Image: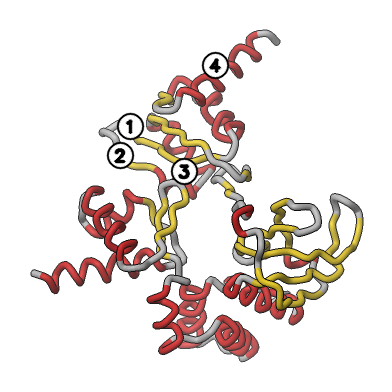
Amino acid sequence: MRHDKLDRELTLMLLMTENKRYTVQQLCERMNISKRTLYYYLDFFRDIGFVVEKHGTVYSLDKSSPFFTKLFRKVHFTEDEAITMRRILESSGSHSAMVDHLKRKLDSLYDLNILADEQLREQQAQNLSVIYDAIKYHRNVILHHYSSPHSNSVSDRIVEPFMLMNNNNEVRCYELTSGMNKTFKLSRMERVELLADEWEHEDKHRQIFTDIFMFSAEEQMHVTLLLGRLSYNLMLEEYPKAEAYITPHDDKHWLLELDVCNYAGIGRFVLGLYEDITIMGDGNFKEYIHQQIQKMSQV
């Protein structure tokens, strides 16, 4: 019946707008549907105007999609209002169940975990608010007195901010003077000024990915491994985030399928447990491992 289908569509929509990101496998398991059915729903969302984002095997709905924008204007708070409410809840000093519930609700809706830090300065919260608006309205900003340890300098940077990262502690920007995409830390900004100028270089924006091994890059490489029990257990112990990318293969093996930014991180793990792991899929990673083995044999 149509109302059953609508219920599934709305449930999937809610899952895909949570701050927790679900892989294709996790969405299928939670919805009890096949991958083919899931892709059908994703195409349907795109057809009716939703922005479907894909990062590796993770799918989500962009909250800036027209439907959400209209809905938020009617029943939700703006980011500035949400930030203000989060500050009020923090400053109340109350640890009641209701206050904790409201904090969790705001965090789930607006990804404001950065504001839970009691050491967060008022200026940093204001900087975050300005950056939110700049990303939302595609505007440029000036990062006043940005302190860079790489160049050992303090300077103003005019940038196009387009993505908040690392629990809102960092922002990915296109810097106009250098013509490069860079990641800036909010803690190193003295003040952020919103400009009237709109983005002019959106086609050059490149987001940066960070894999579970803490390597970062603008491009990702797909890796598929068949893990034995030992490597499966150690993977979860050393890299808990890997759980989202692991599925059972049989009684004694598990399939790890994920995107990485550098072969070095996962390569170290594979080389240490080589007899318990089978490399599947992309031949480039196999070649990388073979080269590393040859280098070690020459030592």
Q: CA distance from mark 1 to mark 4?
A: 23 Å
> Viewer-proximal residue, 103 or 169?
169
Query: In the image, is residue 128 above or below residue 71?
Result: above
Callout 4 crowding tier (Cα within 10 Å): few <14, some 14–19, many ≥20: few
Where in the figure is residue 132, as x and y percent of width and height?
A: 62, 74
Q: Earlier in the sequence, mark 3 or mark 4?
A: 3
Callout 3 crowding tier (Cα within 10 Å): few <14, some 14–19, many ≥20: few
| Mark 4 lies on residue | 290
| Mark 2 lies on residue | 248
Q: CA distance from mark 2 to mark 4?
A: 27 Å
Q: Marks 2 and 4: which is nearer the front?
A: 4
Q: What is the three-letter code of the residue carrying label 3? A: Leu
In this view, the residue farthest toward the front is 200
> Viewer-proximal residue, 272 or 85?
85
Q: What is the three-letter code of the residue carrying label 2? A: Pro
Disc number placed over residue 253 in the picture, else none: 1
Quadrant of the image containing the C terminus: top right
Contact check, label 1 and label 3, Cβ < 8 Å:
no
Q: What is the three-letter code of the residue carrying label 1? A: His
Where in the figure is residue 55, as x and y percent of width and height?
A: 47, 51
Contact check, label 1 and label 2, Cβ < 8 Å:
yes
| Mark 3 lies on residue | 236
Q: Is residue 38 left or right of residue 116?
A: left
Where in the figure is residue 107, as x and y percent of width and height?
A: 51, 75
Q: Earlier in the sequence, mark 1 or mark 3?
A: 3
Which residue: 41% across, 89% down?
A: 74
Q: What is the three-letter code of the residue carrying label 4? A: His
Query: In the image, is residue 244 above or below residue 138?
Result: above
